[in-house]
Image: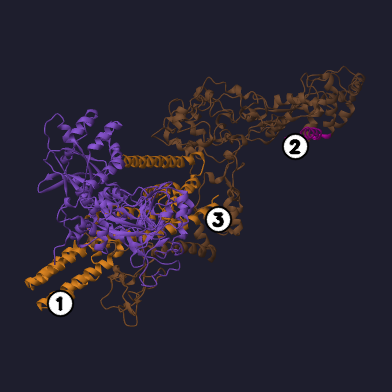
Amino acid sequence: MRAEHAISIRYFTLLGIFVAAIIAFTLHAIEMPNHLQRPEFLTGYVMFGLMLLVALLNVRKKLSMVPIGRAAYWLAGHAFFGVMLIGLYFVHTQTIWPEGGYERAFAMMVYLVTASGLAGYALQRISPRRLAAADLEIIYERIPAELAEVRRKVQAIVLESTKESGADTLGRHYLESLSWYFRRPRFFVPHLFGLQAGQHWIRFQVQTIERYLSAAERAQLTKIEGLALYKDKIDLHYALQSVMKYWLLIHVPLAAALLALMFWHIIAVNVYAR
Amino acid sequence: MARPQRWDAPFGPEMTDTDVERLLTLPEIAAIERGKFPNHTPLVGVIKNDSRLVRFEAGDIVVREGDYGNSAFLVVTGKLRVVLAPKLPRELIGRQSSRRKGLLEALSQIWTNRVIPEVRDTQRYTDQKLRGSATDLARSQVFLQDVPAVLVDHKTAELGPGTLFGELAALGRVPRTATIFAEEGAELLEIRWQGLRELRKYDAGWRRKIDERYRQNALKVALRESPLFQGLNETELQEVANATLFETYGSFDWHVSYKRMREQGKAEQEPVIAREGEYPDGVLMIRAGFARVAAKMGNGQRTLTYLGAGDTFGIDELWAGRDGTDVSLQTSLIALGYVDVLRVPAPILEKFVFPKMKAPPAPLIERAGRPLTEDAPMEWAVEQRFINGTKSMLIDLNLCVRCDDCVRACASTHGGNPRFIRHGPTFDHWMVANACMHCADPVCMIGCPTGAIHRSISRGAVVINDTTCIGCGTCANSCPYNNIRLVEIRDVGGRPIRDPDSQKPILKATKCDLCETNPGGPACVRACPHDALRRVDFRSGDIFRSLG
Amino acid sequence: MMDPEKFRHDSSRYERPNLRYRCGRGAKWGDPCPLGPTTKGQCGGTSECHPAKVGDRFECRRPAYAGGPCSDGPKSDGACSQHRPPCRPRRTIRSVRGILAVGAFALVVAIIAVFLTVSPSSSRAITSAGPLTGGHANFTAKSGCVSCHTPHNGDVGGWVLAAFREDDLTPNCLTCHTFGGDPRLGHNAAAETTPRGRETSCTECHTEHKGESFDIVMMPDEACNACHKTRVDGFSVNHPQFGETFPHAQRTSIVFDHTSHFAKHFLNERVKDSAPENCTTCHEMADAVKSVKPRNFNETCVTCHGDAISSRDLVLLRLPEFSENLLDKQKVMGTCGPTLDQWNMMMEAMSGEEGDMEEMKSMMTGEEEFEPVSTEEASAVSAYLLGMAPDDPETYTKPMQEFLNRLIEEGSAPIAELIDQRAGKKVSNRLLAGLNPELVRRVACAWASNVEYSPPNDPEFGGWYGDGLELKYRPPSSGNHSDPVAYEWALFAAASQGEKDEVLVDFAEVMRKVVLSRTEGVGACTKCHAVSDDGKGGLEIEWRYRETKANPFTRFDHQLHLTLVNPEGVNLVDPSAGCRTCHTVNDQAQYQASFDGSDPHDFQSNFAAIKKETCAQCHNRGQVRQDCKTCHSYHFKPGFDLRMAKDAK
């Protein structure tokens, strides 16, 4: 506990130092034109350094085998400097929307990368709590197998019920409606937004078929309902874990493009503006 | 089906009656008073079912220093050697050298790690000093090739016929303290702990022998380490030691019943060591194993805390009653699995300890005042026996973004292969993932035929020597937490390696080694970008505190 | 909760998120097979196990995690009985992400490369930081980027060099812009105004490529403070006090005593009606900026001082007192004819009286007592021209009489000759414009005959005329303010300041004292036109209104402030309104005396110095703007080079 305290103190001390440094730097950069100095190169190269630092998170993830600081610090730095970079960007360009086609493409990329980063950060803070509340934990890669197993179980119940009762009521309903649900994860978007569409759908299905079933069949239906509700949780995991992975599919390639744009920008300003 | 009996599964099925007859003539066994044994467990039964005859060739290692074992040995014929000093090199007894990699070497794993899973350089396995059969892997042995050289280089002592050894490790659940090997062909009677317990229980001679050895070797050490006896001088300590009683509770094979409990969802009746409301006759000190302190709570027992090696129980009440009033126990002490307990009688305490003692800190019962929810995760950890772990992987699911960075970090330090699975029992928003917990009581180490699984000297992590592992699966089956996994290995070309005779794949036991050979500690913890993953000892402090 | 059975060591195998492929069946939500794809992305296999031959029969070897040995068992030929169709493994999200990231990087690099190579305009699109301001865009349209950015059309090597070299754009700016001074110096002015070791460049202050209408000439106060040691945070805050004589460090070119005019002349009953109503009656406000020009003479001064010009004559020659008469009387008479006295004498002689004849003879031969008709000094002009002291008959008698001889014979030519000689160039035609040689001869004849010249009538129209002992010039009273002859004589006198001949230096000064006299000088020019040192050792007559050269970087727009003080209808004598709000009359000043010398900086203005507080009444925090650029400009004399026009659209 004491150690944890020490870590948080270190966290905030570090954070304080960085914030102070960035504020001091920003003030300095703003002050520079007053001494007939151009701050663009200074802010530009500082941003270049920070961009590389921020991009190094990806490298850090590939270098887990060597002790180069905890990834948690790296990510905190990534997020922190990422946000700071937007501030520095305004200090650097002194505009929200620059002139010039290339500059605009660059600015657009800066905004997109930052926006996707912020969105991803928010997602990563919210989604885990929603998943933990689902009271089911499943590895993303195992979802297909788990679904297949649920499907197998449901089909077995339906077959058994049909065999026992001789009526195809449940079987027919399975083929008509339930099989759609069990085929793959469903209600992706409702799950993203925390809607209970899946549960509602299950309830509706049960209510629809229940009146036509015998007592034995109803017992089987209850089992199916249990499995369906279980699958609903898996669906939630599928939806939330998917977005927690897919947002990086936007953020990372855009960031790579931004790096490429940045390199050209640095070459161009060195050739033209100096 | 007949009701299962105690000796349905004898230790050595091949023991014949003639063997038993022969053994009964051994002086050490002949001296036992058979009459003291109850009818349902006669001495002959104990010999026949709880022991077995084992042969060792010259150079065979009988017990390895650092191993855990559940049996003691009685030398029948032949000559053994116990290595005193210097200790045998670790490679010689089947351990792996746990040299820490340098930074560059660690970094080189980027290109040396294989994409193909579980690739091994089979060349390493060819110079194995293994003896045994392919049919019974558990009987394979690591042996010393050059016994004379060992005798020259190391100071050893001879163990001749009639010597009993290994009983401390068997009963006390502590690692073997020395390596013993056969100098010449030798026949040994291996007695499993259940038999040993019966012998100690019913025969005064064996009890005296075992207890004396225990007092000499282990007891004073245990007492001296306890803060309770800090102020005592050597003679006083000796007096306390002389008066101290030893008791064991619970099943040595607790993990078996625990696994059953987990599989059937039914709690085994846990043995009560001391019961709430009774009057204490002495302070109880845990020497090995775990016990929980519980108080009645509605229809059940609420766990207030749990005690491990060195912790004491009953001191609060004895202290309160030192003026002569009778104070009954406010809490119960219940064994969690196998517990080795020392009982220091109350008069001894009053005579030697209390005069020099300050009032004990907050009594255990005070914990009963805490809200139930606060203790809920701890209750869960006790129930799941996670308290055994010293480095359990605890994941805060409120923070975990399921990115698998920890798993990939693990793979990056283990040749491209993960050594844990990011799934496991959950409670509230906590998950104890299936990664080796590096138990205080490592049941996985019992019965490893080659000593491949062992504690590393450097950090005390439980590690497996891949070279000497024969893939028998004993450890994986023993682990109550399913944290050891057998993998089918491949050669450097990526082809699966199979036994040419049986076509069965060659297996190796794998598990988390706490990045033993890697600089910087467990890579999984370092790799977690959200501080969601920690390696914790459930015994230390407030670990269920969210960092988020 | 997940079923704990699923965590069993023999049923749950390690997940390997470091692999690049996942089972294709799983991707389609089928049951993924336990073998999984190969690391290269192929299906891991279609059979579930490799049965082993034990003895003479085959045994199933399906591992526990895949369900253990199957019930069907191997086929008789040893093949696995459990077959699945192969799948097409998919890449994992992570693997796709890596490809996308590398792809995105490569795509951007490729796009940049294409833009750079396809055409100049696409290359410009990818390098330009934004549109230029209108003017710059226009003038660089033809040459493109290279107009300013020299390395633009260079090869790769040049680019690399440029990237590492400080490349100042200033020389390229100077192809169009001029500044009337060194562009590298602060304020384009003298070197000492720039801090040592510091050169300026255009891009220090001016930023381009910020859009068509970007204000590229903006200059914040801080930019001034960057160099100026005296920090100014706003005019009212800490701008230094103005100088003690500000803005009257140098005397005006026109001598106009505001004090005496205000206090005396304009109140004079005689001229009261023609006195100006207010300041703008005389001062031209129409195009007033920093300087407020007075209207010209003919619109203002002429009312009272119209006849002053023709009231001052230039005395070109004066017959001085001769100590003796060395002239050849016969020759004089031969050329000039006899004087009236001589004529009478001749008439008397011809009427027969002896004595008269003798008398005439003696008169003709000059042997009688000489009694000079003049007792004057020679004119200052002639003193300079002839190089003789005007007041010493002993020295000047002979040369002067010889000069008279020449005048008799040659008219005005000898004078012109001397003038040109003194001026060192041909100026006599202008100085002697309108001078009739006959007049010269007549005057000279009279003087040579030792008589006063008596003109036929008064010279009422001005011009050259003789009068008794003097040959003079009077500016015509035709109302021409700038009389060319008087003008030229004033210039001639002023130029004599540069006389090198030691003998003549004193005589030149004598002449200047007369010709440039503020009270007596010809045409009264110097009464109002200041005679000042020209800074080169000479004298300069300030004919024109001179805008002040002091404080070249300071601006003040009088016209803008006019409406504030509303001088129309304001009584001139009211000291608290109109122009006098700021320009208060200082009646203690020795204004006239300031013009006695030629040093223009030895000056006391009619007006008190303007104080900072006067301006700060309005130019104050929260009121009117008070930044540096309100009154000061940076560039010295900004201008354009005509070359720029050729590249215009």
Q: Which chain is brown?
A: C
**Colour in which the image shows chain A:** orange
Q: Nearer the viewer, residue B29 or B83?
A: B29
**Looking at the image, which residue sits at the far top?**
C369
Pinpoint the chain carrying mark 1.
A
On the image, numbered disc 1 is attached to which residue? A172
Residue B363 in percent (x, y) is at: 18, 36
User: Going 85% across and 25% down the picture, which residue do you hit?
Assistant: C399
**Residue A265 vertical position relative to residue C239 in the rendered view, above or below:** below
Residue C139's disc number: 3
- The dominant secondary structure in magenta is helix
Magenta range: C410-435
Q: Residues within 10 Å of mark 3 (few under 14, many from 20)?
A: some
Amino acid residing under circle 3: Phe
**Residue C516 picture quarter:** top right
Q: Residue C595: image x %, image y %?
A: 62, 25
Mark pair 1, 2: CA separation? 130 Å
Where does the C terminus of chain C fall, quadrant-wise?
A: bottom right
Residues marked 1 and 2 touching at CB (< 8 Å)? no
Viewer-nearest residue: C504 or C105: C105
Q: Please, what secondary structure does the residue beneath circle 2 have? A: loop
Tag of residue A235? none
Residue at 30%, 32% in the rendered image: B234
Residue labelled with disc 2: C427
Are there few (<14), some (14-19), or many (20+) residues within 10 Å of tag 1? few
Disc 1 marks a residue whose amino acid type is Arg
- The colour with which the image depicts chain B is purple
Real-space CA distance between mark 3 and mark 2, rounded to the nearest whole angstrom:
50 Å
> Is B54 inside the magenta-drawn segment?
no
Q: Tell me where residue B249 appears, x and y as whole percent.
A: 20, 48
